[in-house]
Image (cartoon, helix red, strand yellow):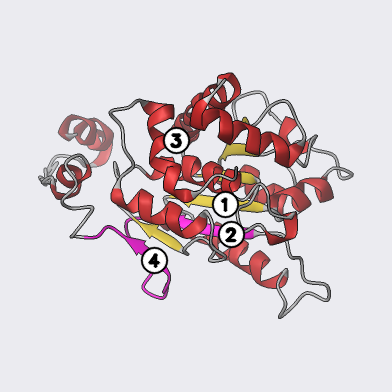
Amino acid sequence: MALTRDRFSEFFAAVYGKNYAPFPWQQRLIERVANEQIPWPECLALPTSAGKTACIDIAVFALACQAERPPKERTAPRRIFLVVDRRVIVDQAYRHAEILCEKLDAAKNGILHATAEALRGISSSKVPLTCHELRGGIYRDDAWALTPAQACVIASTVDQVGSRLLFRSYGCSDHMAPIYAGLTGNDALILLDEAHCAQPFLQTIKAVRLFRGEKWAEQPIKAAFHVVSLSATPPPELKDVLHAEKETDFTDPVLGPRLTASKPVQLSVAQKARGKKLHRELAGAM
């Protein structure tokens, strides 16, 4: 029996514990992307601590819900990239995805087993979901490119995904560059966290999306390719934006206090921070 979006809260509790439930905005998002032909919104305008990393869980469950569809009819991509220009957040997102992969792989029954079986059916693999980390300072994990049919989550910095998307893969041969570009730019969801800090990259991937579409491409590519900005300060020109709602999100017992918490700011002036004392005085004031 096919999975449906109505079971997302059950899936969420199975992964994180029975005392955990999706936030209202997360429930609205899964209802939109799981079983409908409507793609992801352009932007999720949500502040820090609103649970944006759970977009990984939403994307994975949406893919499982569409597992029985022919590949050309799926709007849920099999490659899920969470991209952010801060290594510490990349590490956190990778660990989040790693826990999800472990839970799915070990599941023997229930909603997690059903989700895992649906994902296995997509790739004909024993492993339902894999996760990978792309950033500097660690061993480069390119195993995700060896099995294009595999459902996977990739936590990455901007430069790693951007270079692959533009046929300039860091540390890879020229022969592999088209493969990485094809996998990154097709059947892929790019969740760009802190998008306000990565505007050049956002403009680039929007151009890629335009050039692969019907207006420009001689042979338009039908595989899903969605780009979603995760930012508390979305650009005013964006029209399709998911916001926190006063009637639901602000009244949620867990999320509400996070959204309404005061954030006091104090200005400290380092008056002696001049000349040779500049750095010392600034450090002391901080």
Quadrant in the picture for the C terminus: top left
Ranked by sequence position, the earlier of labels 4 and 3 is 3
Say which amino acid is labelled 4.
Val
Residue at figure coordinates x 45%, y 45% from the top left: 55
Quadrant housing residue 273:
top left
Check disc 3 and report its element: helix, strand or loop: helix
Ranked by sequence position, the earlier of labels 2 and 3 is 3
Check disc 1 and report its element: helix, strand or loop: strand
Say which amino acid is labelled 1.
Ile
Instruction: Reply above or below: 218 against 10.
Output: below
For label 3, the residue is 11
In the image, taking residue 238 as reference, residue 172 lies left or right, namely right
Residue 190, numbered circle: 1
For label 2, the residue is 226
Q: CA distance from mark 1 to mark 3?
A: 23 Å
What range is drawn magenta here? 225-245
Quadrant housing residue 151:
top right
Residue 241, numbered circle: 4
Q: Position of residue 225 (x, y in %)?
A: 64, 59
Q: Position of residue 66 (x, y in %)?
A: 62, 51
